[in-house]
Image: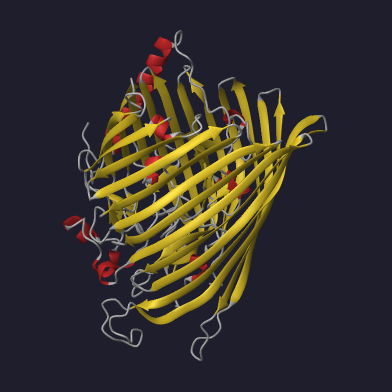
Amino acid sequence: MTICGNRRGTMLPLAISLAAVITCGTVAANAQQTDTVPQKLAPVVTVTREKGRSPLEVPFAVSTTQPDSARPGQKHTLLDETLFLLPGVTVSNRNNPSQDPRVSIRGFGARSAFAVRGIRILRDGMPLTLADGSTPVDYLDLESVGEIEVIRGSASALYGNASGGVIDVHSAPPPAAPFAGGVRGLGGSNSFQRWTGIFGGTDGPVGYLGDFNYTDQNGSRDHSRQRVTSGYGRAAWTTGKTNLAFQVLGFDEPLAENPGALTRARLDSAPTMADPQSVLKRARKVVSQVQLGLSADRPVGSGQLTANIYGGTRDLYNPLTYAVVDLGRASYGGGARFAQKVRFIGLDHNLTFGADVAQQSDHRRNWANCNAVATSPSCPTPGQEQGVIQIDQNEDVSSIGPYLRDELGFANRYFVTLGVRADYVRFQVHDHLITETDPDNSGNRTLHAVSPIGGVSWRYRPLHSVYANVSTAFETPTTTELGTQPSGAAGLNPDLQPQYSTTYEVGAKGIAFLHLRYDASVFDTEVRDELIPYQVPGSSGRVFYRNAGHTRRQGIEIGISALVGDFTLGGSYTLSHFRFQQFVVDSASYAGNSIPGIPVDQLQLSATWKRGGYFVSLEGIAESKMFVDDGNTTAAPGYSIMSIRLGGTSLFGQPSISPVLGISNLFDARYVGSVSVNASLGKFFEPAPGRTLFAGLSVNMGR
């Protein structure tokens, strides 16, 4: 198979492989129908906020993956590795330790300059998404992940302020023994090293699981050193009829350098270099965060009551090319819902009603970045990083979202879901920097919407169903997006509006030939006032936001997986035809242009062989070109790459050992992993690493 970066036609080799996967899986399944246990769909999904519901009954696009089970040997440091093979989900790895990957579902989230936008993210049901709709994912521990469920599309509206979907990360179940533990060490290219300890157990009604990690690496580019310590813990127990769970996430990153994005000329001549301005200004971040959560559920009469509370703090020191940002955050919230089956008008209804509340309080201070500046009015003291203070304000966001859902079933074949959610999000700014030349910029805005959804599913055979839905969603700007104005003023941008979307979708899912699991959907999403990032000359890379009049997203998503003998095969294809319908900036009309930051075609393939505790896993991804600006004046070229991992799991009894060897970008293709949308001075491109290697060894006892 020929792998070519930066060349047209990169989809063809992987397309041929995908056809081979489907054909081989189908032929082998037919040949083995009589003597092989059928593959089953995930028996239940919980991301729909209901336990025990078959995915065949859910009239929405819901995907489930078990990353380590299907594709062993992962490093657990990369979100694109964990979310691999999910149709409709695109993860653009910036290869920049100071910025989160750009995670998008159906294009929502592609605008993100940092953190994740437009998508709700949860860990074991606890929201990680803030009240303003943004999600820092640097502290999302990936070591103890057992399963990930994803809702794709506007049906995620029942979770609140999001347009694209929901990602719910579930921890692996605790070991059956009273105590089990293990250690793991990894090392590889770019001075990468990672040390992990994991523990867990079950003792009567109590089960627990936890891990702690230390990672140190230089990065594939100049000025991209990172050091981070993180951990996760969860304990669950039952008392009487009540199930309780407590979880904690901890994260400390004393160094994460920011290499910035490159122009096309620098990308072609020296892709491992850092943006010179980022080096001069010592762009980086220092962050620490802790979040705690407690959840409970118990039967109440013939219904089920579920509730959770959570809270945490985050401290961020973030020198950027245009300013030094210091942010202290406290966030907390909770939710409750009650599910009850009732008989009404001769029909059985499964009613769920509940509400979510969240609060976010940020103290933000911005100073002039005086690195590499001798003296100036903004930098009066030579050698001092922080110059004149520019912003000193408290930003408070509070949200409340009551919702109601009704589910009906007929003859165990026809299922109807109706729901509605009302969201109220209030932004307040208290300006502490008031002078004769800088007036009080305090203020507030309340953004709200009512988002109905409805869908039907027909389970026309025991292992097959088709569905259709119409859904709406509401997404506010974040505090950073509302508070960043081209004038440089503090306070809230009075002109920036939330975006609203309506989605029409049909799909099918099930199991073919007893072995081939499939999930396919076609959708059309209309978006009003889409939030668009942009930069202006002289802003030193600062990102601002505006609304596009109207956009339209049409897409096809296909996911397949198959168990064939010792092989686990998987593939996904995503077609994203996303266009501006009405969008005029100054005198330029962008109607008909592609929305930047999203490839039209994405193809992912995986084949894993397991036998006798040994494994080999081969993965490939191909993406078409990706436009980098609203005018579609230039694009990051398409690419295709392959990676391989091989090793063993639980070898040689107790204690068991698990060696692994991995090679990413096997054929050393040069390609762009992510882009900075609408960047000024042509700094669009964030290059990906060439061929990288890693090796590791785990030693486990009782697992």
User: Where residue 490 sits in the image (x, y, percent)?
Assistant: 50, 77
Q: Is residue 643 visible?
A: yes
User: Where residue 636 sits in the image (x, y, percent)?
Assistant: 29, 52
In the rendered view of the protein, which quadrant contains the C terminus? Answer: top left
Residue 404 falls in which quadrant of the image? top right
Q: Nearer the viewer, residue 275 or 179?
A: 179
Q: Nearer the viewer, residue 183 or 345?
A: 183
Residue 318 falls in which quadrant of the image? bottom left
Going by the image, does 131 lie left or right of 595?
Answer: right
User: Where residue 549 sits in the image (x, y, percent)?
Assistant: 52, 61
Q: Is residue 83 visible?
A: no
Q: At x 44% / y 80%, what residue is drawn?
A: 390
In the rendered view of the protein, which quadrant contains the N terminus? Answer: top left
Residue 338 against residue 448 in the figure, above or below:
above
Q: Residue furthest bottom?
A: 436
Q: At x 31% / y 26%, what residue is drawn?
A: 615
Q: At x 55% / y 73%, what residue is drawn?
A: 394
Q: Nearer the viewer, residue 228 or 107?
A: 228
Going by the image, does 542 lie left or right of 581?
Answer: left
User: Where residue 697 sits in the image (x, y, percent)?
Assistant: 29, 36
